[in-house]
């Protein structure tokens, strides 16, 4: 049997609907410069659509990867306002965030819809970052594992083991996003371990060992190292703290 490669942690900045063109370029330059000295972590930044191209140019041939925050499941056609996977590839994206909780809860995206995007992303050669996470009420009702399990099942339905192994999962408890309330390392690790077990049960242990599972929700330089030291936490998806180079790089430095 072939040895299973180590999972390289992925720290990704989800800039959401923030920054302007100039600030996006300045931030991308600062991250690209610092990333030259970093080898143990993969770094990605996910600007708003309209800045993808200038950020790609700012990154030059830096190791920092580019990601988008969403996409249409459709390849082309009369879909006013939408952006296809092929377009994201064309501007140099490697990753695309799919099923973020803000899209699930503010825009009503369902697991079935997210699943169509996951397939379209993979078909176009993009790596999906599939987000799952429970509401506070789910957690208080003891339903965390059931909720994230159903999201994983629905969002990643129909993927082959090889395709699943390339997917990045992001566990983002909804109650921890943008609230300053971070899941404790133990709370997060428990869910990450449960997700990996579900992938193992659905596919096999080799596939499960290859899937990177990021944590997201109020990650900061001060809490990153402890979260990232957990055995099943393979990086972070960072919102607010990804908008300042110093904070984002402080989180990157938390990977040991
Ligand atoms: P915050 O880091 O601002 O809590 O956002 C997390 C998030 O939603 C990343 O996708």
Image (cartoon, rainbow, N blue to C red):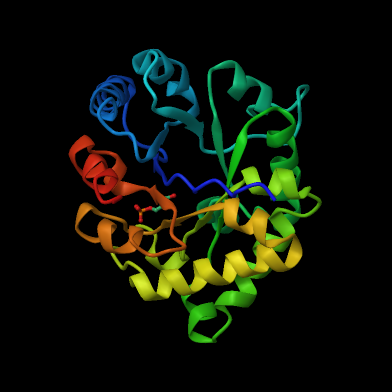
* Front residue of this view, candidates 130 and 54: 130
Q: Position of residue 203 (x, y in %)?
A: 75, 60
Outermost residue on the front side: it is: 1
Residue 201, placed above or below residue 42: below
**Left or right of 101 on screen, residue 151:** right
Q: Position of residue 172 (x, y in %)?
A: 47, 60
Q: Residue at x 73, y 28 (%)?
A: 79
Outermost residue on the bottom side: it is: 141
- Asked if residue 84 shows in the view, the reply is no
Q: Position of residue 183 (x, y in %)?
A: 36, 70
Residue 203, placed above or below residue 184: above
Q: Residue at x 66, y 56 (%)?
A: 206
Q: Residue at x 54, y 34 (%)?
A: 95
- Asked if residue 163 shows in the view, the reply is yes
Res 131 quadrant in image: bottom right
* Front residue of this view, candidates 207 and 90: 207
Res 116 quadrant in image: top right
* Front residue of this view, candidates 120 and 33: 33
**Left or right of 245 on screen, residue 83:** right
Q: Tally the marks.
A: 0
Residue 237, placed above or below residue 177: above
**Left or right of 57 on screen, residue 139:** right
Q: Position of residue 106 (x, y in %)?
A: 54, 54
């Amino acid at each position: 049997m072939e040895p299973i490669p180590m999972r390289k942690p992925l720290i990704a900045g989800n800039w959401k609907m923030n920054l302007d063109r100039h600030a996006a370029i300045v931030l991308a330059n600062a991250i690209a410069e610092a990333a030259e000295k970093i080898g143990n972590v993969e770094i990605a930044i996910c600007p708003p659509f309209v800045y993808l191209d200038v950020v790609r140019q700012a990154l030059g041939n830096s190791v920092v990867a580019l990601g988008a925050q969403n996409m249409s499941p459709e390849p082309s056609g009369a879909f006013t306002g939408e952006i296809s996977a092929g377009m994201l590839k064309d501007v140099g994206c490697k990753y695309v965030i799919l099923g973020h909780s803000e899209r699930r809860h503010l825009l009503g995206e369902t697991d079935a819809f997210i699943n169509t995007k996951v397939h379209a992303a993979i078909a176009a050669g993009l790596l999906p970052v599939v987000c799952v996470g429970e509401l506070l009420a789910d957690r208080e009702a003891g339903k965390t594992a059931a909720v994230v399990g159903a999201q994983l099942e629905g969002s990643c339905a129909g993927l082959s083991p090889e395709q699943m192994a390339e997917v990045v999962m992001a566990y983002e408890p909804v109650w921890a996003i943008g609230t300053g309330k971070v899941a404790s390392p133990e709370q997060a690790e428990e869910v990450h371990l449960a997700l990996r077990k579900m992938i193992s049960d659905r596919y096999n242990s080799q596939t499960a060992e290859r899937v990177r599972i990021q944590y997201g929700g109020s990650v900061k330089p001060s809490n990153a190292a402890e979260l990232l030291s957990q055995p099943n936490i393979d990086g972070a998806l960072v919102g607010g703290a990804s908008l300042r180079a110093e904070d984002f790089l402080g989180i990157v430095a938390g990977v040991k």
